[in-house]
C-alpha cells in the first residue's frame, strides 16, 4: 500500500500541518490502495500564502515564458502517462486501456490545445483603428483555487492548471480525495519542469475542510470548481462574501434526440456513449428521446446493445466498463434503479444488484429503462452511473420541450439526416454544447453549460480567458 502524506506547497513537498489519515479505496476490490493525509484550514492558508507571494512575479512574466513551461510540461506528462493511467485506473475504476487512451490522453490533448491557442492570443491589443490610444490588456485574475473531481481527474486538472498557468495566475489545486494519486504525480511534473515556487500548490483534502477554506478565503481571487450542482451551490454561497469569481462546471442530464431518419449507428452510439466511463460523465446522454415511429425498434436495439456491454475489473485490459467509484455512489445508483421500477418505467436491460459473477467491487449492471417520462425521478436526477432512460416523442416541438424540461443544460445530442432540422435544433436546445450525429467537438472547442450545469467555459481560448481580467487603458503612447 502506498503511503504518501506530503503536500506540494511553495515549490517543496511539506508535511501537513493538521492532516488526518484517509484511505483511498480501489473500487474494483473495495480494498485500500493508498493512505494519504487530508489537510485542513492551516494547510490551505499556507498554500494560498505561497500563491499570493508568487503572483506579482509570475503575472508579469512574458506570456511566451509561461507557454514554454507548459510545453515542457507536455513532454514530462507524456513520459509519465503510464503512471498517470495506472493511478486513475486503480483509484477511480477506469479500465486500464480506457485510462491510458482517454483518461490520461485527455491531459495531453488539452495542454497541446492551450499552447496552440495561447500562441495566437494578444494579451495587449488595440481597441480598434478608431481609437489608436486605447488598449485592451488581459491580466490574470490572481490566486486561483482549483477544485477537481474524481470521474475525469486529469481531464479536469489539465483544463484548469494549463489555462491558469498560461493566463499568469498562481494556483492551489485540491483534487478529489477519492482520486488524489494522479494529481500528486502531476505535482511532481510541475516541480520537474521548473514552475517557480508558489505558482502551483497542491493540498489534499475534502470539500468540507480544504474546499470550504479555499472557496471562502479572502486571498483567493477565483474558484474554478468541477463537481455536483449541490456542491457548486455551496461553493457559490461561501465565495459570495469575498465577491471572488466563481467558475462552475457542474452536472448534466443530456438529451439525445433520435429522429426517424437517424443513421443506422445512432442508437448503438448513444447507448455506448452513456455507458462509457461507467456512466460517470456529466455530459453523458442519459435521456434518449426517440420519435414514436421507430420507438419499439430503438428500445429493442438499445436493450440488446446494453446487454452486450461487459463489466470487469479496472486492472484488466479490454473494452469493458469498470466499477463506479465508491460505495456511496453504488448505493445511490441502486436506489435510483429501484425508484425507476417503482415509478413504472419499463426495465428492458440490467437492473438492481451487481452483475452476475461479482460479489465484491462497486460494479453496476448496464441498465436501460423504456417508457420513461420527465416526471419520473430517473429522468430528473443525475444518476452518474450506467443507466439510460428512453422517452418517446411525436414531433420535433415536443422533443425540444422534453429536452429543455430540466434544470440542467450541459450537452444535448441530435441524430437526424435533415440538416435544416439539425441546425434549427442547435439554436433551440438550451445547453452549452450540442453535438450532431456523433461528431465530436473539435480541438479548442469550449466545454461548459448553462442553468444548473454551471457557468464559464473550459478549453481553448475560452478556457484561458476565464482566468483573465480585462483592463481598458486610454491614452496609451506609441513607443
Image (cartoon, grey):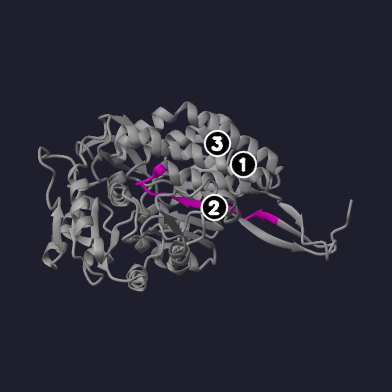
In front of the other: label 1 or label 3? Answer: 1
Start-end of magenta stretch = 138-153
Q: Residue 410 in magenta?
A: no
Marks 3 and 2 sit apart, C-alpha to C-alpha, by 17 Å
Q: Indicate the position of residue 62 as horizontal and vertical percent values.
A: 72, 42
| Disc nearer the start of the sequence (1/3) | 3
**Which numbered tag is attached to residue 310?**
none
What residue is disc 3 on? Answer: 11
Marks 1 and 3 sit apart, C-alpha to C-alpha, by 27 Å
* Element marked by disc 3: loop
Q: Indicate the position of residue 179 as horizontal and vertical percent values.
A: 34, 42
In front of the other: label 2 or label 1? Answer: 1
What residue is disc 2 on? Answer: 144
Q: Residues within 10 Å of mark 2 (few under 14, many from 20)?
A: many
| Disc nearer the start of the sequence (2/1) | 1
Q: Residues within 10 Å of mark 1 (few under 14, many from 20)?
A: some
**Label 3 close to label 2 by CB (< 8 Å):** no
- When the figure is inspected, residue 182 is found, relative to residue 396, above or below; the finding is above
| Residue nearest the viewer, comparing 101 with 307 | 307
* Element marked by disc 1: helix
- Residue furthest top in the image: 79
Amino acid at each position: 500500500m502506498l503511503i504518501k502524506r506530503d503536500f506540494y506547497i511553495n515549490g517543496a513537498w511539506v508535511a501537513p500541518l493538521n492532516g488526518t489519515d484517509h484511505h483511498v479505496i480501489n473500487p474494483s476490490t473495495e480494498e485500500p490502495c493508498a493512505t494519504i493525509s487530508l489537510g485542513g484550514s492551516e494547510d490551505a492558508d499556507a498554500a494560498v500564502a505561497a500563491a499570493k507571494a508568487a503572483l506579482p512575479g509570475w503575472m508579469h512574466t512574458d506570456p511566451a515564458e509561461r507557454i514554454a513551461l507548459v510545453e515542457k510540461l507536455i513532454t514530462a506528462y507524456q513520459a509519465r502517462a503510464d503512471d498517470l493511467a495506472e493511478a486513475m485506473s486503480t483509484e477511480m475504476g477506469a479500465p486500464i486501456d480506457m485510462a491510458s487512451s482517454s483518461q490520461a490522453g485527455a491531459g495531453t490533448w488539452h495542454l497541446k490545445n492551450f499552447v496552440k491557442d495561447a500562441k495566437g492570443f494578444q494579451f495587449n491589443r488595440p481597441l480598434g483603428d478608431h481609437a489608436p490610444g486605447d488598449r485592451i490588456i488581459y491580466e490574470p485574475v490572481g490566486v486561483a483555487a482549483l477544485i477537481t473531481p474524481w470521474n475525469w481527474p486529469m481531464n479536469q486538472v489539465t483544463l484548469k492548471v494549463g489555462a491558469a498557468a498560461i493566463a499568469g495566475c498562481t494556483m492551489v489545486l485540491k483534487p478529489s480525495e477519492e482520486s488524489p494519486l494522479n494529481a500528486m504525480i502531476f505535482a511532481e511534473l510541475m516541480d520537474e519542469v521548473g514552475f517557480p515556487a508558489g505558482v502551483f500548490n497542491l493540498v489534499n483534502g475534502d470539500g468540507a475542510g480544504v474546499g470550504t477554506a479555499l472557496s471562502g478565503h479572502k486571498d483567493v481571487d477565483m474558484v474554478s470548481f468541477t463537481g455536483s450542482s449541490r456542491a457548486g451551490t455551496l461553493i457559490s454561497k461561501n465565495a459570495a462574501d469575498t465577491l471572488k469569481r466563481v467558475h462552475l462546471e457542474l452536472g448534466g442530464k443530456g438529451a439525445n434526440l433520435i429522429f426517424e431518419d437517424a443513421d443506422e449507428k445512432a442508437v448503438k452510439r448513444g447507448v455506448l456513449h452513456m455507458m462509457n466511463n461507467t456512466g460517470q460523465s456529466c455530459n453523458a446522454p442519459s435521456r434518449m428521446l426517440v420519435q414514436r415511429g421507430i420507438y419499439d425498434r430503438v428500445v429493442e436495439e438499445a436493450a440488446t446493445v446494453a446487454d452486450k456491454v461487459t463489466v470487469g475489473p479496472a486492472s484488466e485490459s479490454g473494452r469493458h466498463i469498470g466499477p463506479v467509484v465508491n460505495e456511496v455512489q453504488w448505493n445511490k445508483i441502486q436506489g435510483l434503479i429501484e425508484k425507476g421500477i417503482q415509478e413504472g418505467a419499463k426495465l428492458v436491460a440490467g437492473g438492481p444488484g451487481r452483475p452476475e459473477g461479482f460479489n465484491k467491487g462497486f460494479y453496476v449492471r448496464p441498465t436501460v429503462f423504456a417508457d420513461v417520462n420527465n416526471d419520473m425521478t430517473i429522468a430528473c436526477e443525475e444518476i452518474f452511473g450506467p443507466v439510460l432512460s428512453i422517452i418517446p416523442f411525436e414531433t420535433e416541438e415536443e422533443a425540444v420541450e422534453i429536452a429543455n424540461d430540466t434544470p440542467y443544460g450541459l450537452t444535448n445530442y441530435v441524430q437526424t439526416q435533415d440538416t435544416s432540422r439539425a441546425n434549427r435544433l442547435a439554436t433551440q436546445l438550451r445547453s452549452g454544447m450540442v453535438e450532431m450525429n456523433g461528431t465530436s467537438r473539435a480541438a479548442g472547442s469550449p466545454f461548459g453549460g448553462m442553468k444548473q450545469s454551471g457557468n464559464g467555459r473550459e478549453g481553448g481560448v475560452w478556457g484561458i480567458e476565464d482566468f483573465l481580467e480585462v483592463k481598458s487603458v486610454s491614452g496609451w503612447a506609441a513607443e
